[in-house]
Image (cartoon, grey):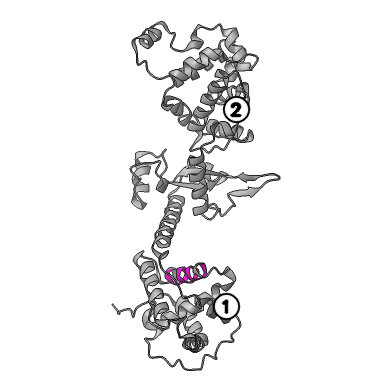
Amino acid sequence: MEFSDFFDIMWTYLADPESKESNKEGRPEFLKNLIDMLIREPQTEEEDQKAENGDLNPLNNKEADTINKYCSGSRKIPKKDAKDILKRISDGNRFFERIVFAAPGAKKGIRDELRKRSFNVTSASLGKVCFDIVKAFLEKFKEGKSSVTESDIADDKKNVTYLKLVHDVRFKCPLCGRELITDGDTEAIAGYDVVHIFPANLSMEGKAEFSKIKKAPENSDALENKIPLCLNCANLYLENPTLKNYQTLVNEKRRIDIEHKLAKGLNQLTLEDNLIKVIKGLKEIKPDKITNPISYDAHKIEEKINNDYPLQGAVQFYVMGYYNKIRDQFSSMEGNSFSFDDLATTIKLAYIKFKREGLSQSEVFNHLAHWILEKEHLENDFIEAARILVAFFVQNCEVFEVEIAQ
């Protein structure tokens, strides 16, 4: 991207080009104002003197026609001026604010124009990206060059953070389910924006209502308050956040947080190597007729699952059809390379870890099944076999306790 392209984007969406189109002073004044927002407060006597004389910004001494040439790209900002500006560059806060407090349509326009030019920018990162682009142009001018690309401002840490956030939501928009990254002809295309979950543009009344669901974090830029949405949902949420969507995003973050904690806690648990034979074998075993008795002295399933009837029915079906067969398989495998007691203890520990996170019985049951697949490196084709195995341990008393009637 050339400087003239970037200037035209800023001019179009942050200035008032229609009323100043024929005003030769409009564009030069706008560029000087942009540079003013980049320069920090004076920090030396020399800088104080320059500020008093209006010389802190080197463009103040230029003719309007000359600055117009910088704007149009027919002339580069001189190396010396670029060095002077970089020497006094600020932290960018004033520049950020100019963009943050712009009209929603203006911010969307800037973001979309930069994306057309292959810059990885979201509404949340717009101010910083624009600031980094200006700095990159000044660095180029200092070297006698003029073009800036995404690679000149790429922030590997930010890219890793965004990739992690997209991975956490399983590459789908939490609000509409749309894919966040799609395949292009030559490269993947990012179709998402990272937004603050607790909106920043709420009224006092709005903040009070949203806080009833979950209070805003102390640091609004913390990862816990960021989530990727598809571009359409992001725009709608930024402009008109609703309590319903806020609740959905809070729930999604809760799911992600629980999964992270569980993954960390379960990494140390190891399942028996021979378990994979049992899981794979279940796909080829015909279930017993449900009239066959279960020859095991255990509490009834109804005593352990009495508030989730679909789960209760599913576990009863799995147990009646497969309990005896699984028990016989485990019995035949017992020996130096397999210990049923060790396996049962591991399943019990995994269950306790899931339970401590406050999950429902259905969530615990499904998490255990998926965890077993992951540990055994099996495809999702074996999920029903894993669920049958979890049902075995429900009947065997490693999973779920007898619930005391209230």
Q: Position of residue 332 (x, y in %)?
A: 49, 88
Q: Position of residue 233 (x, y in %)?
A: 54, 46
Does residue 140 appear to the left or right of 312 in the view shown? right
Was residue 150 drawn as part of the magenta stretch in this picture?
A: no
Q: Nearer the viewer, residue 55 or 328?
A: 328
Q: Nearer the viewer, residue 36 or 327?
A: 327
Residue 128, can we see it?
Answer: yes
Q: Which stretch did the figure color magenta?
A: 364-374
Was residue 365 drawn as part of the magenta stretch in this picture?
A: yes
Q: Which residue is mark 2?
A: 148
Does residue 41 appear to the left or right of 170 in the view shown? left
Q: Does 21 sit above or below residue 62?
A: below
Indicate which disc residue 280 carries. 1
Exactly how many numbered labels are in the figure?
2
Mark 1 nearby-residue class (10 Å; few <14, some 14–19, many ≥20): some
Which quarter of the image is occupied by the N terminus? top right
**Residue at image location 60% in from the left, 12% down from the top:** 68
Q: Position of residue 64 (x, y in %)?
A: 57, 8
Q: Does 171 sit above or below residue 53?
A: below
The answer to which image quadrant residue 220 occupies is: top left
Amino acid carrying mark 1 in the image: Lys
Q: Does 206 sit above or below residue 119?
A: below
How far, Cα to Cα, is label 2 from label 1?
Answer: 55 Å
Amino acid carrying mark 2 in the image: Val
Residue 33, can we see it?
Answer: no
Q: Nearer the viewer, residue 310 or 194?
A: 194
Mark 2 nearby-residue class (10 Å; few <14, some 14–19, many ≥20): many
Which quarter of the image is occupied by the C terminus? bottom left
The answer to which image quadrant residue 136 occupies is: top right
The main secondary structure of the magenta stretch is helix
First in sequence: mark 2 vs mark 1: 2
